[in-house]
Amino acid sequence: MAKVTGLSGNEIYCMALKHYAPGEIVVGNSVNSMGFLGNLAAGVRGIGGGEIPQVTQAVEDGRIRAFDRMVAEAKKEGAAGVTGVTSELRDFNGNTEFLFVGSCLRHTDDTAAIPFFTSAGSAQELYCHMDAGYQPVAHVFGNIAYLMGLGAGISGGFKTLARGEIAEYSAIFNTTRHAALDRIVAQAREARANAVVGIRTNISFWHGTHEMLMTGTAARNSALPDQTINNPVTSDLTGEELWAMTSLGYAPVKLLMSAAVYSLGMAGGLMSALKSLTKGEINELTTLIHDAREVAIDRLKREADSVGAEEVVGVKTYVAQISPNLVEFLAIGTAVRKSPGVAVATPNLPAHAIVSEKDTWIEGAFGFSLDRNN
């Protein structure tokens, strides 16, 4: 029978260059009763704030069961690996389905074979990783469920009456983000990988808590320093960016994150509200966001210095309004440094590895309809 794969034509072309052909789509799922978690989170740890371990563990267990079933299905198909692995959480009246989907790969040249692997990101990104020397090992993830909490709310609440950083809120945001990163590194270490590449981060509101999820591909690169086997490097660079930096002799050191939560203050909030009724710059908001940005980036620089990085590249900045008078500034980037021995396998990336895919179907009001504009 014909194979059914989730790989696009460009992805199939890229994998062919690495001696792989497409196999079947594989799926793993697990439906769990999770409705009790919202009350548990609010009742057990809501006062103190921070992580809700019971929720974190319940979500991790559900994901692991679904992921293991996807892997078992792939091995039953005789796959050499699974790429394009994605995960979802779907709610059904208090029950949650944990879902993993990926596309199998099979060897076309046994001499080029590497052990069975799973990979996050597209097959285009996988090609870039492999060509830069990062052989895939496993799709890995790290998560944390957390609350701001009444404790931080009370102490931080008084500080919101004055202008400036709310250290309690900044601490919660920074701690949770780094906890998720620590967990994805722990999975990579368990897999005997010395790098986690292509990390993607998602924050969602789920069952009364916020969940931060990081996913990436644990990989091995023999050109990285020996100590990285116990302390894997981390990177959120795209596949193309990682390939480009490798071609210049750079290797990732660590994914850096820094958050700063600032309060406009009661007086500042009142003044900006009045000024918003008229045309012109709102100085209070301008300086608030500027100050938050400076604090977050300064922390990023200091962390980069502490890990011996030469540059922080691919820095992305985000500003989010938490409440009428509170704003969070978040900076994320990958620290890199020159590393002898790192190199790409080919002098140029094929166009098929960098071209953006186009969807030919779009979701309509009553299901799916053909997008005739493409």
Image (spheres, rainbow, N blue to C red):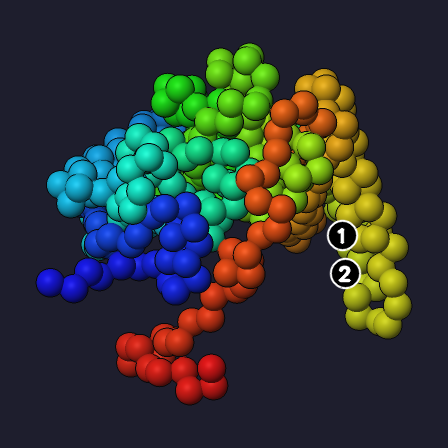
Residue 193 position, x and y percent, is 43, 23
Q: Residue at x 69, y 32 (%)?
A: 249
Amino acid type at circle 1 is Gly
Q: Nearer the viewer, residue 247 or 50?
A: 247
Judging by the rendered image, the residue that carries numbered circle 2 is 273
Residue 248 position, x and y percent, is 71, 38
Quarter of the rendering containing residue 65: top left
- Dot 1: what SS? helix
- Left or right for 24, reference 259: left
Residue 204 position, x and y percent, is 44, 47
- Left or right for 24, reference 158: left
Q: Residue at x 55, y 61 (%)?
A: 351
Contact (Cβ within 8 Å) of mark 2 with mark 1: yes
**Residue extending furthest toward the left:** 1
Q: Nearer the viewer, residue 9 or 274?
A: 9
Judging by the rendered image, the residue that carries numbered circle 1 is 269
- Dot 2: what SS? helix
Quarter of the rendering containing residue 79: top left
Amino acid type at circle 2 is Ala
